[in-house]
Every structure is written in structure tokens, then in C-alpha cells.
Amino acid sequence: MPTKRDYYEVLGVGRDATDEEIKRAFRKLAFKYHPDHNHDDLAGEKFKEVNEAYQMLCDPDKRTAYDRYGHSGAEGLFGHGFEGFDFGGFGDIFNAFFGGGAAASRQTAQRGADLRYGITLTLEEAALGCGKKVAISRTENCQTCRGMGSQPGSQPSRCPNCNGSGQVRRVHQSIFGRFTQTATCPQCRGEGQIITDPCPRCRGTGKERHKRQIAVKIPAGVDNGSQIRLKGEGEAGTRGGAAGDLYIAISVEEHEFFSRYRDDLLYELPVNFAQAALGTEVEVPTLDGNARLRIPAGSQTGEVFKLKGQGIAHLRGGGHGDLLVTLFVATPDPLNAEQKKLLRELEESLSPNNMPKPKKWRGFSKPGY
């Protein structure tokens, strides 16, 4: 069996400590190691040790015996009263001693719960904005009793157990003396009143469930992770409390050929090497239809062309991002015999002077950044 530490050492006080100093030291350590506040594996053992030391030193007779005879002598006189200590039995005492335990009244108005609903948009819908309708199920105040729970024309009666307060008092005798703790009345569940003539529609709950179609305006520029709050479209409140809110969580589908970076759109444009070498004018897609883009002669793979204002609308207002077109020189395949003949003739006519100087490869992602 491990040797017990000196009780004064456990509490961190001297042997001449006053009763008030011992109580103050215990209060500090009990709060530190109580399992409700400290989830360390050793906290429970330390809490029991602190409590055992305090139970011995707070009692004048036990303290005198401990000072004179030590652990073995004091336990011989007063017994082993610390084995199998139960935290549950100390819970109410702890709450009273540290200021907890006073049950909050449930008679005040309570706000309803918030709801969350997810919707998926196309890139075009996210970029340009749109209107959507979402179907939700939520609790609302009963239309017959207007959330009161009683049959119209009748009134709830005062709870006889708590006399309408919603709370009852319990008296505890502890090592600190006598404590009074306030708790929620079990009969009326803190309401202070009992419904004797319940509403037949909601059976006294004051609530009923409905399915609703809610119109949602999606602003231009939303993205994955954006959230729209619809105030008052959540669950109904209690006792006149405000309804909760409805949060719409946005996710955006992958696009067939556009990628998004912040408020810019990214597009890779394939051209053949004749177009890149000689220059050309091509059509590129945008969110508003096709736009003309001029490719200058001698353009190379990886070059970026900007179509200003053809990107995503800024969510906070004021303008749009850009459409960034990255050039990709593609090798045509398959080739017929005539095309192969012409390419061989071109190859023979080319010299090293026709080749551009090597550049560091930067890839295609996030062009322009």
C-alpha cells in the first residue's frame, strides 16, 4: 500500500495554518482537480486525496489526533472513512460551495432552435445569382392555442409543488454545514404552471410540425462554403420567444470546362501549332455567351490572355473578376498522308532560329498569380 502524503503538504499549508487558510486552500485545490472541471486521468485520485486531507484537518478533534499520532493514529481513532469515495455524493456539496447548483428558471421566453439546409448550385447560378425554393420541416406555434398549450378559453393552473415559481429548494447537510440548493420543479418542469385542459390540436405541447416552401434569394458571387441566414425561419420559440433562424449552406457543382479561383474564371484554350505560329482569332466561352479572342503569332503554351470583367461577380458588391484564358498548343491526331507530307516539308524548312528560347515551366493552375 503506497505511503500517504502529509495532509498539510497535500493542501499546501503550514502546520500552524488557521481554519480559514485550510478552507481556502481546499477550495482552490478542489476546484482544480474536481472531475467536472479536470479530465486528466490523475485528477480523480488527486481530488480524493485533497478531500481526505480536508476532512481530517477541518475537524478540530481529528486535526489534534493527526498532529499527535499521524495517519495511523488518527485513522485508528476515527476509522477509515475515505475508502470508496463517491464523487456523485459530493456533487451537490461542490456546487453549493463553489456557487453552482442554482437551477435557472425556465419561465422566461426561449428562442427557437436554428435550422440548417444545404443546396447545390451550378457555377452559373453561383456566379450570376438566382432564386431557389427549399422545402423544410419545422415546429411552429399551434394555430389553435397560439403556442400556449391550453384549450382556448381555459388557463393553466399554478403548480402546487413549487407554488408557481418553477423551482424547489433542497437542503443538504455537508462537511461545510447546511446548504440550500435550488432545482427545477419536477412536477411542472420549471414552468410554474400545469396545463389541466390541454389543447386538442397539439395535445398541450403548444407546437405542431409543418412542411414549408421557403423562397431563398441567392446573391451573385457565392462559393462553396458560403452561408445565407434567413432570420426567423427556424423553429418556433417558447413562451413568446423569437423563432430561430434558417441557415442555407451553399455548395457549387464542378463545371464542364471552367475552373474558379477567387472571383476569376480559368479556362484552357487548345489551339493547333499552325494557329499558334501564324496567329488567329477564336471564340472562347464566357458566362454570357461566346467572346472573340485574338491569338498573336508566335504564341506559346502557357501564355495567359485576360478578358476583363468576364469572371464572377464580387459577393460584397462592385464589379466582377476576370476570365483568364491559358493557351494550350495541341498536337493534332490522327493525321492523313497529305498532312504528314506537309509537316515533313515544314520540319525540313525549320531551323534552330525558328524555336523560342526555353522558359521555366509553371504549369496551368492559377494563371496570372
Image: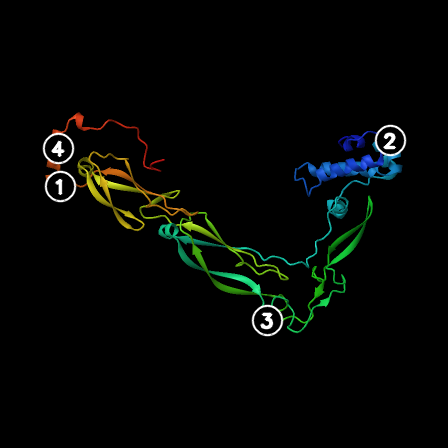
Marked residue nearer the N-terminal end (4 or 2) = 2
Work out whether residue 83 or residue 143 is closer to the camera in this orientation and state it: 143
Amino acid marked by disc 3:
Thr
* Mark seen at residue 336: 1
Q: What crowding class fits label 1: few (fewer than 14 Cα within 10 Å), some (14-19), or many (20 or more)?
A: few
Q: How many angstroms separate mark 4 from mark 2 (CA)?
A: 108 Å
Residue 326 appears in which quarter of the rendering? Answer: top left
91 shown above or below 197: above
Q: How many angstroms separate mark 4 from mark 3 (CA)?
A: 88 Å
Q: What crowding class fits label 2: few (fewer than 14 Cα within 10 Å), some (14-19), or many (20 or more)?
A: some
Marked residue nearer the N-terminal end (4 or 1) = 1
Marked residue nearer the N-terminal end (1 or 2) = 2
Work out whether residue 243 or residue 117 is closer to the camera in this orientation and state it: 243
Residue 158 appears in which quarter of the rendering? Answer: bottom right
Amino acid marked by disc 4:
Leu
Q: Report if the CB atoms under discs 3 and 1 are less than 8 Å apart.
A: no
Q: What crowding class fits label 3: few (fewer than 14 Cα within 10 Å), some (14-19), or many (20 or more)?
A: some
Residue 39 on image: x %, y %? 65, 40
Marked residue nearer the N-terminal end (4 or 3) = 3
Q: How many angstroms separate mark 3 from mark 1 (CA)?
A: 81 Å
**Helix, strand or loop at mark 4:** helix
Is 247 situated left or right of 359 in this image? right
Amino acid marked by disc 2:
Asp
